[in-house]
Image (cartoon, helix red, strand yellow):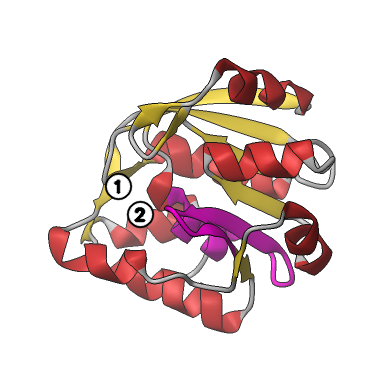
Amino acid sequence: MTEAVVELQPALRPKLKEPMGPIYTDAEELLAAASKPLITVGDMVTYYLLEAGRVPEVALVDERTERSAVDDAVVAAFDGFDREVTVENPPAVLTTELLETLQTAIAEADERSTLIMVDGEEDLATLPALVAAPTGGSVIYGQPDEGMVLVDVDLASTDRARDLLSRMNGETRRLWSVLSVGE
């Protein structure tokens, strides 16, 4: 089930470098502004929130940060989740496996926390997380060399994520179907 549903084309890369929300460098401040369900994308973001005492409802990690392996202490901190699922997702794509696992984890967020261990790259998962998460939730991801970006799930952030996803190469109709959202 590692079939790619959509793939990022180079022309969209600059759009993805623009932060989608405020940038925080202090995990406590970020947590004070965040809401449930809390979805994290990235090893260091997830680690900092765990160190601050908060287990995200859903976390996506790949044991890498800025293309380098994370320290063993970071990986060890990921033990606090109710469930761990490993998925394959090559760089610059979103696979059926990642999307289905993300959608299920978000749907079950009230019942259990889920760590999605990505074999490949999790960076693009921020966009489908914003589309699949309920309004009022929070998606947090890392902004390299700057901090942690907090995105409130609302109409504006969801529309922006949907727009970026719809401009990717591939099967957007299938993407919406897997995420259980309408076109």
Instruction: Examine the rendered structure and indicate whether residue 164 appears above or below residue 70.
Output: below
- State the mark number for residue 5: 1
Please indicate, yes or no, whether residue 183 appears anywhere in the rendered image.
Answer: no
Asked if the stretch drawn in magenta spans residue 130, the answer is yes
In front: 112, or 80?
80
Task: Pinpoint residue 9: horizontal percent, then vertical percent.
Answer: 17, 58
Quadrant location of the C terminus?
bottom left
Check disc 2 and report the residue beneath it.
174
- Say which amino acid is labelled 1: Val
Gap in angstroms between the C-alphas marked 1 and 2:
7 Å
Task: Pinpoint residue 36: horizontal percent, then vertical percent.
Answer: 79, 58
Region of the chain picked out in magenta, as a range = 125-149
Task: Pinpoint residue 142: horizontal percent, then vertical percent.
Answer: 51, 53
* Pointer 1 with pointer 2, Cβ within 8 A: yes
Residue at figure coordinates x 64%, y 41% from the top left: 46
Instruction: Examine the rendered structure and indicate whether residue 96 appears above or below residue 38.
Output: above
Residue at figure coordinates x 76%, y 45% from the top left: 109
Quadrant location of the N terminus?
top left
Please indicate, yes or no, whether residue 132 appears anywhere in the rendered image.
Answer: yes
Residue at figure coordinates x 44%, y 54% from the top left: 145
**Rendered image quadrant of residue 108:** top right
- Say which amino acid is labelled 2: Arg
Within-10-Å neighbours for mark 1: few <14, some 14–19, many 20+:
many
N-terminal of the pair, mark 1 or mark 2, is: 1
Q: Is residue 23 left or right of residue 7?
A: right
- State the mark number for residue 168: none
In front: 16, or 165?
16
Residue farthest to the left?
A: 10
Residue at figure coordinates x 62%, y 59% from the top left: 139
Instruction: Examine the rendered structure and indicate whether residue 41 appears above or below residue 37.
Output: above
In front: 172, or 106?
106
